[in-house]
Image: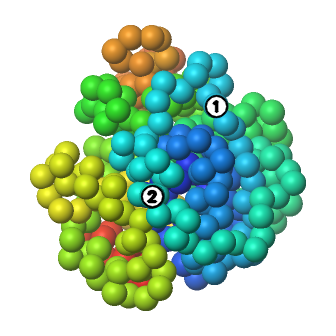
Amino acid sequence: MTRLIIDTDPGVDDAFAIALAARSADIDLLAVTTVFGNVGLESTTRNALRVLALCGREDVPVAVGAARPLVHPQASEGKAAHGEDGLSGQADSLPTRLRGVEPLPAVALMAKVLRESPEPVTLVPIGPLTNIALLLATHPEVKPKIERLVIMGGGLAGGNTTAAAEFNVWSDPEAAYRVLVEEDLPTVLVPIDLTYRCRVEADWLAELAASGPVGAGLESLTATYRAHYSALMGFDGLVIHDAVAVAEAIKPGILSTARLPVQVETAFGPARGAVIADHRRRTQNDLHGARAIDVAIDTDVDGLRAFILDRLR
């Protein structure tokens, strides 16, 4: 059984991702930790609690993490896509969880869970990487307990927040630099180049809504997000970025990867937050400060959609 910790900023696609892990019988969801991002920390925490309540998961501890980036303020949130509350204005329609947040903050809870785990744990950061950078900086002793990082973030051919940068990395480039470039843990990066290809359309969403209370609850959160993507991409549907990363965490190899050296741009300017992958053939001694990680580049798109839908329903 795969042991997971999800670090998240819900967000509509985060809600799908949390539910995907929570509804998978072969996953031991050890904790969910929250971070600023699509909306403020108070809202992302409430949303995580309520999505877990929708899934009937009172057992999963939820801890509150970073309210802001490591160094510079977040320039803007993702409310244009996700709505003012992060869930298309429907957060309060979800059930209230009886179990509130844990007394330990997110980094301390992750460290505790990792130390006490008898087996290695996969960390799945699907928001800004602030909590993960802090965890690795302040608790380096837990690194041997981390099986791998499966990170949703970055855009190799361009961004969705700026011309160069994807939202999660752009929200805290310094944290992304520390995790993607300076650390040495096994890492899979799931960029928007692939997640956009895994979009789901109206018939998929209708099948999800008809599958039962959880599916109907998830579909009810999508109006603002769906309208955003329908206008942006010219189809009736949406992109479930974070669920694609969680699918890889659940079923390693469902995404095909290439090992590429990457850098993260932290300077101010039009490229701030860009993830730059070097596609040239280089030796390990000729990477100019970059670190080679596994970047998801392809998948059986229809098979992935079917996998996610089957688990959610």
Nearer the observer, 282 or 42: 42
Query: Depth check: 185 or 6 in front?
Result: 6
Quarter holding residue 181: top right
Tell me which residue sits at (34%, 55%) in the image. 225
User: In the rendering, at what x and y percent does residue 266 appear?
Assistant: 49, 17
Measure the C-alpha gap from mark 2 to mark 1: 23 Å
Name the spot of residue 7 as percent of width and height, x first: 62, 51
- For image coordinates 80% across by 33% down, the residue present is 138
In the rendered image, is residue 294 in sight?
Answer: no
Residue at the spot 67% in from the left edge and 36% down from the top edge: 67
The structure residue drawn at horizontal position 70% and vertical position 72%, both measured from the top left corner, is 97
Instruction: Give the residue pinned by disc 2.
Output: 89
Question: Which of labels 2 and 1 is toward the front?
Answer: 2
Q: How is the image coloured?
A: rainbow
Q: Height in image: 230 above or below 74?
A: below
SS of the residue under disc 2: loop
Q: Quadrant of the C terminus?
A: bottom left
Q: Against 203, is 243 above or below?
A: above
**Quadrant assignment for the N terminus:** bottom right
212 displayed left or right of 201: right
Disc number placed over residue 49 in the picture, else none:
none
Kindly identify the amino acid type of the residue bearing the numbered disc 2. Answer: Gly
Residue count near mark 2 (Cα–Cα under 10 Å), binned few <14, some 14–19, many ≥20? some
**Residue 159 placed where, x, y %?**
31, 33
Can see residue 220? yes
Closest to the observer, 22 or 37: 37
Q: Is residue 18 above or below residue 59?
A: above
Q: Is residue 302 above or below residue 214?
A: above
**How many dots with numbers?**
2
User: How many residues crowd around disc 1 within 10 Å: few (fewer than 14), some, or many (20 or more)?
Assistant: some
Label drawn at residue 68: 1
